[in-house]
Amino acid sequence: MYKKVYLLKRYLSIAILFLLVISLLSGCNQEKKEMVSKNGFFFDTMISIKILEEEDRGTKLLEACWSMCEKYEKIFSRTREDSELYQLNHRDTQEVQVSEDLFQLFSYGKACYDRTDGKFDLSVAPLSDLWDFKGDSKQIPLEQDLQSALENVDFSRVHLEEPNQVLFENPDTMLDVGALAKGYIADRLKEYLVSEGIETGWINLGGNVLTIGEKEEGTPWKIGIRKPFGEEAEICAYVEVKDSSVVSSGIYERYFEKDGVLYHHVLDPDTGCPAATDLAQVTILSKESLDGDGWSTSCLLMGYEKAKTMVEAIEDMEAIFVMKDGEIRYTEGCRISLAE
């Protein structure tokens, strides 16, 4: 009897020791999580994504993000002839069935159009082509050309019907989702990464910064706000955020000067010319990056007083306003630190 008990205890001791060794070996084989990053060029800008994950798995997740970026560029690009939006703008029928992604952006654009009394207008594409801030000409369009283009600018003449149907009153209407696409894409990238278990990281789509959780050490992300018309890396203020979006839009992003007058790319759909605004830059802090995109541009178009009132009426949204004279103002709940 005692011999059986002794043998049982011995076997249990050996089994426990064996399990401990296996556990230690498996722990040694586990990769340590580290910040894995990838940089590239999409949506006419440099992009960067960084996540906390084991290197091999993190690399695969970032490759998947790159595939998503390629997919969205083939939907939202206005200049790629193989994109869905390009095909829509060169349609041969005035009733078009579109993808869910494109329909969602049009729907959001319609909401922005309504809340800004028509100032935020996705149908300004003909005006953008005339001004051509991305090209080398840097010429002020002729008045007759502006007036001709304005005849085709009116988002109220574009009708959205479920499921994903777009109806055009004017066959010459062309749409541009450049003011919203990066925000929408950033939200989809974060949605995917979070679904894959990522708890720490950030997505930077050229001015659209969307954070996932906190930094590795459990502190907020510190995001710099670029100084308008300063050097590219020159910062005027900082904000600390976690699991939030920081989106900046400004008249310094694409512009030229002629005869002492600055002409910027934020166009007024009523005049066809750069918007007469007292703001040089607007930064929106929000949960969703799409809101940051839509509201930062809308604020630029509306000017400081209207913009501040509208942002303050929205829960969980803050804004930083940089006036044309360089003064920095912000909504009451915003916590920022000014750069020295």
Image (cartoon, helix red, strand yellow):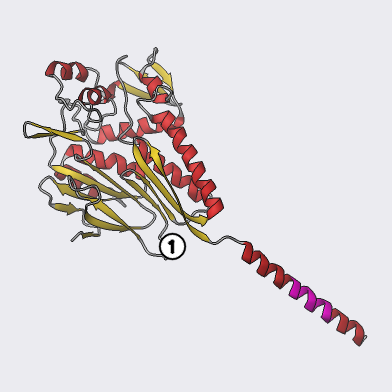
Q: Is residue 296 visible?
A: yes
List the single residue furthest toward the bottom: 2
Quarter-wise, where is residue 161 in the image?
top left
Check if residue 99 falls in the magenta segment.
no
Q: What is the x, y in percent for residue 19? A: 73, 70
Question: Observer-nearest residue: 234 or 218?
Answer: 234
Question: Observer-nearest residue: 61 or 284?
Answer: 61
Q: What is the x, y in percent for residue 34? A: 49, 59
Q: Is residue 313 visible?
A: no
Quarter-wise, where is residue 147 in the image?
top left
Is the magenta region chiefly helix, strand or loop?
A: helix
The three-letter amino acid code for the residue at tag 1 is Glu
Q: What is the x, y in percent for residue 125? A: 27, 24
Crowd rating for badge 1 (residues with CA inside 10 Å; few <14, some 14–19, many 20+): some
Question: Observer-nearest residue: 115 or 236?
Answer: 236
Left or right: residue 280 compared with residue 168: left
Residue at x-position 40% and y-position 41%: 40
In which quadrant will I find the N terminus?
bottom right
Quarter-wise, where is residue 201 in the image?
bottom left
Check if residue 13 falls in the magenta segment.
yes
Left or right: residue 168 compared with residue 127: right
Q: How many marks?
A: 1
- Above or below, comparing residue 259 to residue 62 in the picture: above
Give the residue at mark 1: 216
Q: Element type at marker 1?
A: loop
Residue at x-position 40% and y-position 17%: 95
Please provide the residue range marked out in magenta: 9-18
Q: What is the x, y in percent for residue 218? A: 41, 65
Left or right: residue 56 compared with residue 97: right
List the single residue furthest toward the top: 92
In which quadrant will I find the C terminus?
bottom left
